[in-house]
Amino acid sequence: MVSAVVPTPSRVESLAKSGIQAIPKEYVRPQEELNGMGNIFEEEKKGGPQVPTIDLKQIDSEDNEIRERCHQELKKAAMEWGVMHLVNHGISDELIGRVKVAGGTFFDLPVEEKEKYANDQTSGNVQGYGSKLANSASGQLEWEDYFFHCVFPEDKHDLAIWPKTPTDYIPATSEYAKQIRNLATKILAVLSIGLGLEEGRLEKEVGGMEDLLLQMKINYYPKCPQPELALGVEAHTDVSALTFILHNMVPGLQLFYEGKWVTAKCVPNSIIMHIGDTLEILSNGKYKSILHRGVVNKEKVRISWAIFCEPPKDKIILKPLPETVTEADPPRFPPRTFAQHMAHKLFKKDDHDAAADHKVYKKDDQDSATEQKVFKKDDQDSAGKQKAAKKDEQDANAEHKVSEKDNQDIAAEESK
Ligand SMILES: O=C(O)CCC(=O)C(=O)O
Ligand SMILES: [Fe+2]
């Protein structure tokens, strides 16, 4: 008798729908990444420190005092948390509803239909429908599929690769991207003023209207039979300047704040905004890029729509702006282009993974002793802040995030 060849599903959605009770070992994360994870619905109800909610209604108020109060709150949240729920952000619920329906309808298509949009990471084509590559036997996978594409500026986006179904996908998503771009300008102005800079400064430093690139990643997290063993998105900081996130009101986002994982509550009509590494660098660490991860569950599919606002890869050298540096507070980050910054994070990947990926990585900052003294930001941040667990290069491009985690740090921190 000829034994049937069972195709290995390459999409997490297919795996989830196959009825398996136990997840394949590639999706089982090491114990130190899972400590204190809990059931996400229970976690969402917990008290303790909460991601701040910032009301932007008065961001442009004519009244100096009222406007100032709004600006101060935004600045404080960017400095203390580096992540916040934005409300009264000026983007209509109707448009946001359309974006969610469009993305949701696309992901409701059969996997075979979505495969027509599959990206090809091996040839460097990261745009389209994808999942993290199973690049080695020990490679860790994430419990999600995604759709990734550039959404702004218009001369850099390629509508040919955007979903054609549903028909509202393109109009809704491009209009949303345009409005997010304008919101980014306003936020960057407030954050510039918050550093004592002229209001257009950060906008210019990240590339302005022409060069700041907006990339959308729709994260689709299927139901997971063993959510306590998996991660939808592993712990990382975003490399972007700013990231704006919508979701389908299913909890899943966790932030590593003061040594503990805090679950973001689902705030109606809000947009979650992250400060990414780019602004952390430009502000010499005054604005924080917070470590975060995506947790999955058994009961509900979770979808999130992240727009990463990123400086051009090679055109701009990112380094602390002179105005943010003093003798007492020297530069915490060495000058690097955005591409170099991403590569540097990848270099910090541990040797074991590096071998598995058939790439040569240097150990964390061993390249320069001087650099370690002046620029070792991870130490300054907090002993508890987790570092290093990495993505392969294509994945990092596709997901515009690079994970950071030091297993011992996590174990030490979370066993407290
Ligand atoms: O799904 C989320 O809420 C967060 C996803 C995320 O962190 C990312 O795509 O970089
Ligand atoms: Fe992220």
Image (spheres, helix red, strand yellow):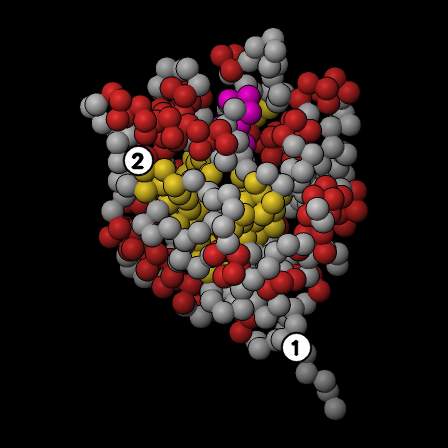
Q: Is residue 14 left or right of residue 345?
A: left
Count of residue discs: 2
Foreground residue, 247 or 317?
Answer: 247
Query: Would you place residue 2 above or below residue 86 in this image?
Result: below
Foreground residue, 119 or 249?
Answer: 249
Question: Magenta residues: mostly which secondary structure?
Answer: helix
Choose the circle earlier in sequence order: 1 or 2: 1
Foreground residue, 38 or 377?
Answer: 38
The percent position of residue 221, horizontal first and vertical second, equals 51, 60
Q: Can residue 164 be seen in this view?
A: no
Was residue 292 drawn as part of the magenta stretch in this picture? Answer: no
The percent position of residue 118, horizontal first and vertical second, equals 50, 58
Is there CB contact under 8 Å for labels 1 and 2? no
Q: Which class describes the residues within 10 Å of circle 2: few (<14), some (14-19), or many (20+)?
A: some
Q: Which of the 4 quarters of the picture holds residue 378? A: top right
Q: What residue type is labelled 2?
A: Leu
Residue under numbered circle 1:
6
- Of the residues tagged 1 and 2, which is closer to the observer? 2
Q: Which class describes the residues within 10 Å of circle 1: few (<14), some (14-19), or many (20+)?
A: few
Q: Is residue 61 left or right of residue 131?
A: left
* Residue at x 68%, y 67% (from the top left corner): 24
Was residue 281 drawn as part of the magenta stretch in this picture? Answer: yes
The span picked out in magenta is 276-285
Q: Quadrant of the N terminus?
A: bottom right
Q: Which of the 4 quarters of the picture holds residue 110? A: bottom left
Label 1 and label 2: CA atoms lie apart by 53 Å
The percent position of residue 248, horizontal first and vertical second, equals 39, 58
- Residue lying farthest to the front in this orientation: 47
Residue under numbered circle 2:
56
Q: Can residue 337 be seen in this view?
A: yes
